[in-house]
Image (spheres, grey):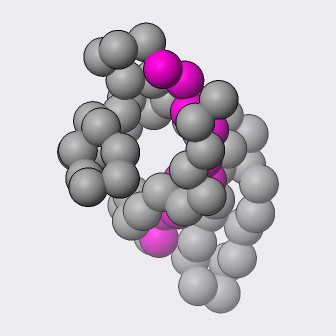
Amino acid sequence: MITTLQTDDYPEITWELGDVLDRDPEERMTVYNAAGFDKDGNNYSASAYFFAGVFEQMEDIERL
């Protein structure tokens, strides 16, 4: 699980990683499908980017 901090656009969200969406061995990048929720019970989906096994960022965040 990963927790992203609150920003101007989104609250603090806790994410659970799912299936691998993309992998680039040359850049040592792996992208996972992620499902998240906030403290108010809202659900989200996004793509979680990891480089060399280290979480880098969430992209394409969508509130469901």
Q: Observer-nearest residue: 52 or 32?
A: 32
Residue 32: image location, x then y, percent: 64, 49
Whether residue 20 is visible here, answered yes or no, is: yes
The residue at the point 39 percent across, 65 percent down is 56
Residue 48: image location, x then y, percent: 54, 53
42, above or below 48, in the image? above
Q: Observer-nearest residue: 2 or 46?
A: 46
Whether residue 3 is visible here, answered yes or no, is: no
6, above or below 28, in the image? above
Residue 6: image location, x then y, percent: 23, 44
In the rendered image, which quarter contains the C terminus?
A: top right
In the rendered image, which quarter contains the N terminus?
A: top left
- Left or right of 64 on screen, residue 3: left
- Reply yes or no: does residue 46 show up in magenta: yes
The residue at the point 72 percent across, 67 percent down is 23
Q: Residue pushed farthest top?
A: 41
Residue range (magenta): 42-51
The residue at the point 47 percent across, 70 percent down is 51
The residue at the point 55 percent across, 61 percent down is 59
Q: Magenta: predominant secondary structure element?
A: strand
- Left or right of 15 on screen, residue 19: right
Q: Residue pushed farthest front?
A: 8
Q: Observer-nearest residue: 2 or 24?
A: 2
- Reply yes or no: does residue 60 show up in magenta: no
Q: Residue pushed farthest bottom?
A: 26
8, above or below 6, in the image? below
